[in-house]
Image (tube, grey):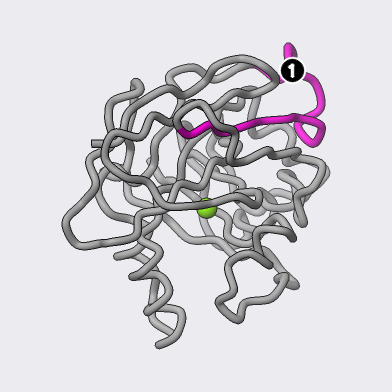
């Protein structure tokens, strides 16, 4: 399976990065390998190659079928359930890569850098995918408040865009970008995330 991730999909997050990047004119996506998955609320261990690992809480869409070249108006057929994830990012390495125009894999694709909620919730229960609220707490304090209506590119446009380049397989995941409020983690932190009031993630940083 593949893990697709979207960068710069919420305006306030683009502004907070201060890396010279601007609001994109077309979706920006990158991949994490399947070895990046962190499941079942297992603890996240800070790797030794970075001094600045950031959390990025994101709505995650699970793709349910084989598909490519999907028009936006048909993209809704690709998925039925959503969850939450943390796109762990070695911000120091990413900043250096951006400055040098280099790829992001070392900053984004390392082992266990894609935490995914144990459950996914049917959209039949949640409603419109572009009207969902989610929050991330660190040590009991809310750090990120996301509303999917604030996405620069809505989910169906993202899925359509990517499908012009890469084939989806059942089980692929799409991280849809993070809202403002990203920040560093340190050992002992507890991350907890809710989607529409339901606890989705709750795990420790070690
Ligand atoms: Mg992200």
Q: Is residue 124 above or below residue 100?
A: above
Residue drawn at (42%, 22%) of the image:
202
Inspect the magenta stretch and tell me whether residue 79 lies in it: no
Please tell me whether mark 1 sits on a helix, a strand or a loop.
Answer: helix
Residue at x 71% of width, y 31% of height: 77
Farthest-out residue, top: 125
| Above or below, 105 relative to 113 | below
Q: Which residue is mark 1?
A: 126
- Image x and y of residue 20, in percent: 60, 81
In the image, the segment drawn in magenta is 122-138
Which of these two is toward me, 185 or 99?
185
Quarter placement of the N terminus: top left
**What residue lies at 65% left-to-right and 49% top-to-bottom?**
179
* Nearer-the-camera pick, 171 or 116: 116
Q: Is residue 120 above or below residue 68?
A: above
**152 to the left or right of 81:** right
Q: Quadrant of the C terminus?
A: top left
- Indicate the position of residue 160 as horizontal and vertical percent values: 69, 52
Residue 42 is situated, as x and y percent measured from the top left of the image, at 28, 25
**Image quarter of residue 187:** top left
- Residue in the foreground of this view, choosing between 13 and 34: 13
């Amino acid at each position: 399976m593949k893990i697709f991730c979207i960068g710069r999909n919420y305006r306030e997050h683009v502004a907070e990065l201060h890396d010279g990047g601007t609001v994109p004119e077309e979706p920006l996506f990158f991949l994490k390998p399947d070895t990046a998955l962190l499941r079942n609320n297992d603890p996240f261990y800070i790797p030794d190659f970075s001094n600045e690992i950031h959390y990025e809480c994101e709505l995650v869409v699970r793709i349910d079928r084989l598909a490519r070249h999907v028009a936006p108006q048909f993209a809704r057929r690709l998925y039925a359930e959503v969850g939450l994830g943390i796109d762990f990012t070695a911000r120091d390495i990413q900043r250096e890569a951006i400055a040098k125009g280099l790829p992001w894999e070392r900053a984004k694709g390392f082992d266990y850098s894609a935490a995914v909620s144990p459950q996914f919730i049917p959209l039949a229960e949640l409603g419109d995918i572009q009207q969902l609220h989610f929050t991330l707490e660190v040590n009991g304090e809310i750090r990120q408040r996301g509303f999917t209506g604030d996405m620069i590119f809505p989910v169906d446009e993202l899925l359509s865009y990517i499908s012009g380049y890469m084939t989806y397989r059942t089980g692929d995941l799409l991280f849809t970008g993070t809202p403002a409020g990203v920040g560093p983690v340190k050992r002992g932190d507890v991350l907890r995330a809710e989607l529409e009031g339901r606890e989705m993630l709750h795990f420790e940083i070690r």
